[in-house]
Amino acid sequence: MASIARYVRFAACAWIAFVIIVSAIPASAQEPSRVDPNASAVTEQGLFQEHNRIQGRVSIPDQRSSVLIQPAGREWRHFRNVTLRWIGGIAILGMLALLIIFYLARGMVRIESGRSGRTIVRFSAFERFVHWMTATCFIILAISGLNITFGRPLLLPLINSAAFSEWSQWAKYAHNYLSFPFTLGVILIFLMWIAGNIPNKVDVEWLKRGGGMVGHDHPPAYRFNAGQKVIYWIVVIGGGLVAATGYQLMFPFYLTGIEGMQLAHIVHAVVAVLFVAVMLAHIYIGTIGMEGAFEAMGEGTVDLNWAKEHHSLWLDEQNARTGVNETRRQPSVRPAK
């Protein structure tokens, strides 16, 4: 019993000593190391390790504005200043190079049987208005948007900083305000032409035969061939994405925080530069790439032989429904190459 009593007294003394030692340690030493952002010797690395961001204090209600620096912001800045420029440059310049090579090799796609001198209505006045409203807004949006990405390294060295600042300010105004009619145009295009742009078996055959762009084979097609359907869905989906992400950037913090806006900018920028590249091909086909194509949106009518070669199934439907408009005469002799 005496030995047990000694052990009890020893254990009690040891516990009392432990309590005294722990109590003597300062409270700050017992807590995990924390970084005081107000300390004079605080380091940026220490703040990142503690908070994964550098954040100050603000007096406005929205505390999210107090975030000054965060690692994701650095990654976004590198994307904007380096990666995006590479993506845009390769996409746009690559498309221009391909179009030049194709034109030199193939030339303009002519109407094989020459002009008939008779025309048929291709697009109504309202359809053409919507197309040109959307196209005009797109061109201005593309130029002003590319200025944000490429203006500083490409345009600023060519003009003085005051002129570049003035141009960029007005380009930003145009980019913001013309986004609204552009979005309206995309919605109207979707509603107007959705019925004719559902893929079908005819599109598969059209693609197999190269759409008449290679050689002199002109596969049958309805009002919109497979190539035009691809453009349609790129406009609808791509236009919808740039509109949705653009409005998220125009009205910050309403739907998401900093990280969400950085992601929105990445999607907006990548889709936009790819959109521009695809539209270059669309503009090429509608102007110098194909004889008679511009008249469809320029005047609303196309030559009967053009319709026979490129949209024979649609022409059959129109002839069965309304007949051919012969009120406008065109030269029946094929222009010399």
Image: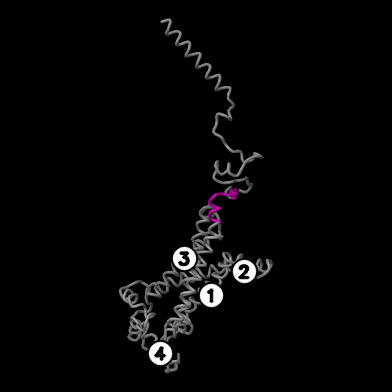
Image quadrant occupied by the C terminus: bottom left
Local crowd size for mark 1, using a 10 Å CA cut-off: few (<14), some (14–19), many (≥20): some
Would you name the residue on which mark 1 appears?
136
Q: Position of residue 92 (x, y in %)?
A: 50, 70
The residue at the point 34 percent across, 75 percent down is: 207
State the extent of the magenta-drawn residues as a range.
65-77
Would you name the residue on which mark 4 appears?
325
| Contact (Cβ within 8 Å) of mark 1 with mark 3 | no
Local crowd size for mark 4, using a 10 Å CA cut-off: few (<14), some (14–19), many (≥20): some
Amino acid tagged 2? Leu
Distance Cα–Cα, label 1 vs label 3 = 17 Å
Would you name the residue on which mark 2 appears?
155
Distance Cα–Cα, label 4 vs label 1 = 29 Å
| Contact (Cβ within 8 Å) of mark 4 with mark 3 | no
For discs 4 and 2, the disc positioned in front in the rendered view? 2
- For marks 1 and 2 on the same chain, the one whose residue lies earlier in the sequence: 1
